[in-house]
């Protein structure tokens, strides 16, 4: 945990903390307020707007990112908690080609408006990392924390199945 | 032209790659240099008079740049010309908890929020009206008084044919009451808008809106600027479902703040505020009476609806008509009377949610017919089959029906689900239910009266071979970008990915009225085909000269242009464009769609007519637990007549999404208020189906190739929601014998029905009375008996 760089003063200005975070393989040093949510750090400080905010109550999963490879809702984590840790956002999924999960969402029409898609994909990456060959029930359980209002989830499940198959064919893990 | 290369082929969407890489820029993703952030002060009471408003402490707060109150934006507005009852910021009265009163722009969101708390507001609380009954019966200062009486926003009474004597001819009649609870769209993306004052004296607004053209008009009116000083750009919409179809106060406020401060300003609603913006499903109380002959033929129907409109008009006049207009597009009803009443209440305003005004009566009638058929001693399915509308006919209320695959939808969904083998035969606690519906492929009239096209498309091509398509249509997830690209590509012999789309920017793109009423595929699709055909003909003319063949022998295929009789020859698309540019100068074309004149000869006939109706039929299989009251949907079968499926992948997506939203409405979703306050304005408490709630869906597409649709297509984004709700309600009755005349069917209601059954009462859950309100005057209209259906096909080749 980072140590406060500046203590709260009489003026009510909140304390700030220096953090070093690796985001999509790149080191970022920043000073953040203790109350800053990770999602705001990602969107506002780093300008990575592919991570979306959908609810303010940790209910929708649109802000899901990978923290040390595990899917977390970045609105439920403070930026200071990400100090000295690794974050992967939707912008970091693609290498030279689309990640198999991204390809699955395109090929299987796993998205309509696309707003839940980044969070949905990162939850799926985490799922496939832990369980490379999930059943449909396991997929539905694995991404149950992510809401979508467009698709009825039918093609999202197919997209994850597509990705699982492709990852197995490519002989790699969950891609983290 | 049935040998398509793009149309009818399952494929992904052109905006897919941007959306899976995080590159799609939604409104809240925009960040402009020097940008300010705005917050709204909202009313804490459901109904009150503003006695005093002092913003001086807010203005004095460090970091605050501007504060607005209602005095700065006094001009009223609203989506419908007849309902100009909204204020961007309230001037005298507040009408619901969440009604905005003042706005602050500051250097950051926190400062803006703190400043709103420093505004001194004194309100005199007025009596609040939270239900339809209270609005009509409770004493006190009304929310508004129009010509229909206190708190009545709209009342309509229409009679087609002689309903009384038609009822007299019936061998049997039945009456039922129903209540359909309100629900909200819950788009994943919270509304957001950014405005910038441009140095040349213009203001630009970026907004998550389904209707940039209507926002453009409302901004001009309220800001007092000509439309040509305002530019509206719709950003990709992160879910709409009708909830982003109105001009909104936050859009007007950011534009005004940008003008006042000279700086860019952003306002993003919180999730709680999205519940206040609302415009969702109208809670609707309904009464229906139907008369039938012994053989099952319907002789007459009388339908009454009371809509709980919330605090403002919104689309409410239209919503009211919609609860009555489309009864006749599913079943043959020779004599029909409709009375609709919409009341103001002190809740967030209701408006158009997917299916707009139609899910409520569809639920009522499909459940009502189950009872009616059984009383008559008929199988409920046979009863429906006896009364289905026929293609290419007129309804009693003058709606023109063209292609109609309803019978095929019914037959296919019954067969796929094994309905007849299951109904009444599954073990206790399990059941199947059926419902059917029709929906419009776009309204034949615009929201404001004018003679101009509803959709316009322009194409620009040059020697590079780039096809730039300009359209005002906005993709809200339904796939309008794909429809525009695919229809254009089909005509030009290209791939959808070859079409570069410039959409929904009022400075750059020609008019499209917006992504509402399931109109875009039909209307913008037709406009795109026309533009593409005209461009193709220009290039064909130049290529005919070069190839020395007649123009009609020039073919466009696989990115090449050739003599159809020598397909191995020819030139690339780029070369053909260069040939045409050399011969004709810069290459561009235009296409436009305006629906034919379809309104009937009476006032109010403008709501309901559509160039084509889609049809759906649904079977739901459920398990209902009489101990816990929990209803689980095991499977849904749905058949949908889409005219022609332009892209089965996207059509399936729209149908499945509709089923999803229907299941949420019938089992989970409801607006709950306590002491005037929305009790559950968050995703934590407002229940939306998750991956684990969703059953398997079997989708069957029926193709009837509509004579006026683009390549024969009709809508698929709203209609398939409609039959899901009654199918589930009917399935619950089959499972446990409980009759639900009210949705959502919550565990509490199921248990209450079981208690009634245990006491020997009828296990019926629903309303028991109607308010005593009738519009005095009834407009009597003769049905168009024997009128011949006239068609207006736009493209010879489709």
Image (tube, coloured by chain):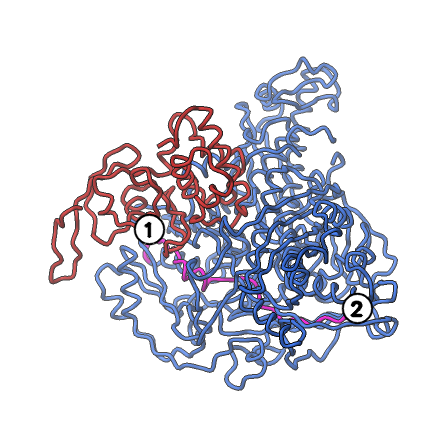
* Picture coordinates of residue B52, whole percent (x, y): 34, 78
- The quarter of the rendered structure image containing the N terminus of chain B is top right
Q: Quadrant of residue A71?
A: top left
Q: Chain of mark 1?
A: A
Instruction: Depth check: give the residue in front, A157 or B235.
Output: A157
Element on which disc 1 rests: loop
Shown colour of chain B: blue
Q: Residues within 10 Å of mark 1 (few under 14, many from 20)?
A: many
Q: Which chain is red?
A: A
* Picture coordinates of residue A29, whole percent (x, y): 20, 39
Residue A75's tag is 1
Residue B413 visible in the current orientation: yes
Give the residue furthest to the bottom: B139
Is residue B467 a member of the stretch shown in magenta?
no
- The quarter of the rendered structure image containing the C terminus of chain B is top right
Residue at image mark 2: B375
**Lateral position of residue B31 relative to residue B420, left or right:** left
Residue B83's tag is none
Residue B160 visible in the current orientation: no
* Picture coordinates of residue B36, whole percent (x, y): 31, 54
Numbered range of the magenta stretch: B261-289
Q: Residue at x 29, y 49 (%)?
A: A77
């Amino acid at each position: 945990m980072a140590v406060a760089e500046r203590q709260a003063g009489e003026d009510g200005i909140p304390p700030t903390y220096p953090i070093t975070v690796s985001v999509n393989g790149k080191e970022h040093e920043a000073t953040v307020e203790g109350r800053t949510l990770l999602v705001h750090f990602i969107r506002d400080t780093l300008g990575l707007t592919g991570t979306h905010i959908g609810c303010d109550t940790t209910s929708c999963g649109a802000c899901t990112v990978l923290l040390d490879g595990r899917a977390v809702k970045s609105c439920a984590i403070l930026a200071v908690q990400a100090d000295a840790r690794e974050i992967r956002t939707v912008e970091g999924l693609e290498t030279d080609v689309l990640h198999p999960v991204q390809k699955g969402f395109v090929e299987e029409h796993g998205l309509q408006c696309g707003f839940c898609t980044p969070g949905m994909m990162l939850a799926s990456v985490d799922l496939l990392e832990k369980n490379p060959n999930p059943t449909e029930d396991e997929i539905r359980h694995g991404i149950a924390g992510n809401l979508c209002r467009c698709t009825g989830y039918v093609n999202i499940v197919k997209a994850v199945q597509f990705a699982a198959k492709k990852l197995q064919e490519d002989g790699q893990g969950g891609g983290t | 032209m049935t040998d398509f290369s793009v149309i009818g082929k399952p494929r992904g969407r052109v905006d897919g790659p941007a959306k899976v890489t995080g590159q799609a820029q939604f409104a809240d993703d925009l960040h402009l240099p020097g940008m300010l952030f705005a917050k709204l002060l909202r009313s804490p009471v459901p109904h009150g008079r503003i006695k005093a408003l002092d913003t001086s402490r807010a203005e004095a707060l460090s970091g605050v740049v501007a504060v607005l109150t209602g005095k700065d934006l006094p001009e009223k507005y609203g989506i419908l010309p007849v309902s100009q009852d909204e204020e961007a910021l309230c001037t005298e009265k507040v009408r619901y908890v969440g009604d905005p009163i003042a706005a602050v722009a500051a250097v950051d969101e926190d400062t803006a929020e703190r400043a709103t708390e420093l505004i001194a507001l004194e309100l005199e609380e007025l009596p609040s009206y939270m239900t339809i009954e209270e609005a009509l019966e409770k004493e006190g200062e009304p929310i508004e008084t129009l010509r229909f009486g206190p708190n009545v926003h709209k009342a309509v009474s229409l009679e087609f044919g002689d309903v009384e004597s038609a009822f007299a001819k019936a061998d049997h009649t039945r009456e039922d009451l129903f209540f359909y609870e309100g629900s909200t769209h819950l788009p994943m993306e919270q509304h957001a808008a950014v405005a910038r004052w441009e140095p040349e004296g213009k203001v630009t607004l970026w907004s998550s809106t389904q209707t940039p053209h209507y926002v453009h008009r409302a901004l001009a009116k309220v800001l007092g600027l000509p439309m040509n000083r305002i530019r509206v750009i719709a950003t990709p919409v992160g879910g709409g479902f009708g909830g982003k179809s109105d001009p909104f106060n936050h859009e007007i406020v950011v534009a005004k703040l940008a003008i006042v401060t000279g700086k860019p300003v952003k306002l993003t609603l919180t999730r709680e505020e999205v519940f206040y913006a609302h415009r969702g499903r109208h809670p609707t109380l309904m009464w229906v009476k139907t008369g039938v002959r012994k053989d099952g033929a319907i002789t007459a129907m009388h339908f009454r609806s009371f809509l709980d409109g919330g605090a403002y008009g919104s689309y409410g006049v239209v919503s009211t008509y919609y609860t009555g207009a489309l009864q006749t597009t599913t079943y043959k009803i020779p004599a029909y009377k409709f009375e609709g009443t919409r009341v103001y209440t002190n809740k967030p305003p209701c408006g158009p949610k997917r299916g707009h005004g139609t899910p409520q009566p569809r639920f009522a009638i499909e459940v009502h017919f189950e009872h009616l058929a059984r009383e008559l001693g008929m199988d409920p399915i046979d009863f429906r089959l006896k009364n289905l509308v026929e293609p290419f006919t007129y309804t009693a209320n003058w709606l023109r029906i063209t292609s109609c695959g309803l019978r095929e939808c019914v037959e296919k969904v019954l067969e796929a689900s094994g309905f007849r083998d299951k109904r009444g035969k599954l073990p206790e606690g399990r059941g199947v239910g059926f419902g059917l519906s029709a929906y419009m492929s776009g309204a034949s009239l615009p929201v404001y009266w004018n003679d101009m096209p509803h959709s316009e498309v322009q194409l620009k091509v040059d020697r590079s071979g780039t096809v730039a398509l300009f359209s005002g249509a906005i993709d809200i997830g339904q796939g309008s970008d794909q429809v525009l690209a695919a229809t254009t590509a089909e005509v030009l012999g290209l791939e959808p990915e070859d079409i570069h789309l410039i959409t929904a920017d009022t400075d750059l793109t020609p008019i499209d009225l917006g992504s509402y009423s399931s109109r875009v595929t039909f209307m913008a699709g037709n406009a795109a085909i026309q533009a593409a055909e005209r461009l193709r003909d220009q290039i064909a003319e130049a290529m005919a000269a070069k190839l020395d063949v007649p123009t009609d022998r020039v073919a466009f295929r696989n990115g090449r242009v050739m003599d159809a009789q020598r397909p191995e020859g020819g030139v690339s698309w780029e070369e053909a464009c260069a040939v045409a540019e050399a011969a004709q100068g810069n290459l561009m074309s235009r296409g436009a769609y305006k629906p034919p004149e379809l309104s009937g000869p009476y006032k109010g006939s403008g709501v309901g007519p559509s160039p084509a109706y889609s049809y759906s039929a649904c079977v739901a299989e459920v398990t209902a637990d009489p101990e816990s009251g929990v209803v689980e949907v095991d499977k849904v079968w749905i058949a949908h007549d889409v005219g022609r499926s332009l892209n089965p992948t996207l059509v399936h997506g729209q149908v499945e999404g509709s089923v999803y939203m229907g299941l949420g409405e019938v089992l989970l979703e409801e607006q709950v208020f306590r002491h005037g306050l929305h009790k559950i304005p968050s995703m934590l408490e407002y229940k939306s189906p998750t991956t684990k709630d969703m059953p398997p869906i079997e989708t069957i597409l029926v193709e009837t190739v509509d004579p006026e649709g683009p390549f024969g297509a009709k809508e698929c984004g709203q209609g398939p929601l409609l039959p899901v709700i009654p199918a589930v309600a009917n399935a619950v009755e089959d499972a446990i014998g409980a009759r639900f005349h009210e949705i959502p069917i919550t565990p509490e209601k199921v248990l209450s029905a079981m208690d009634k059954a245990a006491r020997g009462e009828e296990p019926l859950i629903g309303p028991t009375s109607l308010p005593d309100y009738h519009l005095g005057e009834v407009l009597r209209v003769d049905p168009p008996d024997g009128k011949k259906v006239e068609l207006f096909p736009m493209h010879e080749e489709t």
